[in-house]
Amino acid sequence: MKTFLLHRAGFVFVFFLLIPSYGLLPQQSNPPAAPDTATRTEIALGEALLPKLADRAAGLYLLATDYAALGDSATALALLKECVESDEGFDPSADRAFAPLQANPQFQALVKRAAQHFPAVHQARLAFTVAEKDLVPEGLAAEAPGRVFYLSSLNRRKIVQIQKGVASDFVRTDEYALLPVLGLKIDPQDGGLWANTGTDGTGEAELLHFDAEGQLLSRSGPPSGGRHLFNDLVLRGDREIFLTDSLANQVYRFDRKMHTFTALEFSRALYYPNGIALSTDGNHLFAADAFGVLQYDLRNASSTEVQPGRGATLAGVDGMYWDRGWLVVVQNGIGVPRLARFQLTADGTRVIKAETLEYRSPFVELPTTGAILGNSFYFIGNSQIDNMKDDRVLDPAKLRPVRVAVLRLK
């Protein structure tokens, strides 16, 4: 669930959705390359993928951030122009990768166009706040009985429970020597909680299972060496968990009884997989990466790219949720973050309708993930991930109480 943090700033192009240390580069067994080398490697990979992408604009946006990082403003602007003029929703104005271009008239014209074509949408309201400012929450889970919410903390490395508006520690800081905590899912089988943890500083990661009282039941590490970052997850029955590994560029099936991980094979290479969702019937798995969403048919182990259609993008998705034939998403890797939903065809391979749910409002400063309760979507509105680097808060004075907002899914 982590935002796509590109190695520049921004899965929260802010991609992890903004922190330079969270990269989109493929898994490496060696120490990370120097910034310029890493950027040029990403350019080579992006240009190779570009002809194969269902959403060309998503590839153009990534490449534009790379060329901007190298100081090649002319190439960055040319790529950005084609991207923004696709009118899919990309708006580079809030992306720190383009800070050197802010005064450029061409850049300003692209920002103006994006604002005109995609105006503000404000439907959400404040649900509750958590006073503990330095949580830097990434994951959110909720259950209807008692309306209990759980927030994961990257900075404090713990899990907070909110019940009747009162916040308390479900798992305390350093209680189990946790890594930064990302995606959360409540287990309907036992009332417990599953959590993904990881840090790209060391490439360590774990999948954890807690009981309903916060006692640790199990912890499972990656299936192989190299660098890993367990991000988001979804449960399928009482036997399977599917989770994304953003640094290894994999989606795994985790067997809950055998405690084993098996990597799924997709129709194209994944690039920083993040959000993940499962259809109600349990047949279709959806995995979001930097460039879009892929559907995986669990009945026959086949996959295909979900076609966003003209004027829509599925790029930059952090949190992603299935709701009665729609994918509800938090998009923080397209410049200015937004909440949106996409209605799919019956086979789940093509978008037939796209709607913006919240955009250019105080509730989408830097959203990461959410949770659906009935007809309502609750989401973290100000994760403050952009105030973290190397697993620490950069400027404590800028921290604010955590805001969780809610909107109705009509």
Image (tube, rainbow, N blue to C red):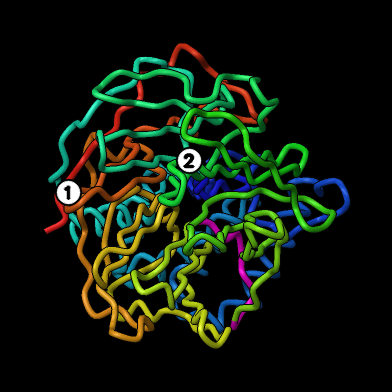
SS class, disc 1 = loop
SS class, disc 2 = loop
Q: Is residue 231 above or below residue 180?
A: below
Which mark is first along the chain, 2 or 1?
Answer: 1
Residue 22 image position (x, y, % from top left): 63, 44
Looking at numbered disc 1 in the image, what kind of residue is underneath it? Ala
Dot 1 corresponds to which residue?
Answer: 120
- Which residue reaches farthest top? 397
The residue drawn where x is 35% and y is 65% is 84
Q: Is residue 242 above or below residue 178?
A: below
Asked whether 50 or 195 is in front, the reply is: 195
Q: Is residue 53 above or below residue 85?
A: below
The residue drawn where x is 25% and y is 22% is 165
**Magenta span covers which residues?**
267-274
Dot 2 corresponds to which residue?
Answer: 192
Asked whether 4 or 142 is in front, the reply is: 142
> Separation of disc 1 and disc 2 at Cα?
38 Å
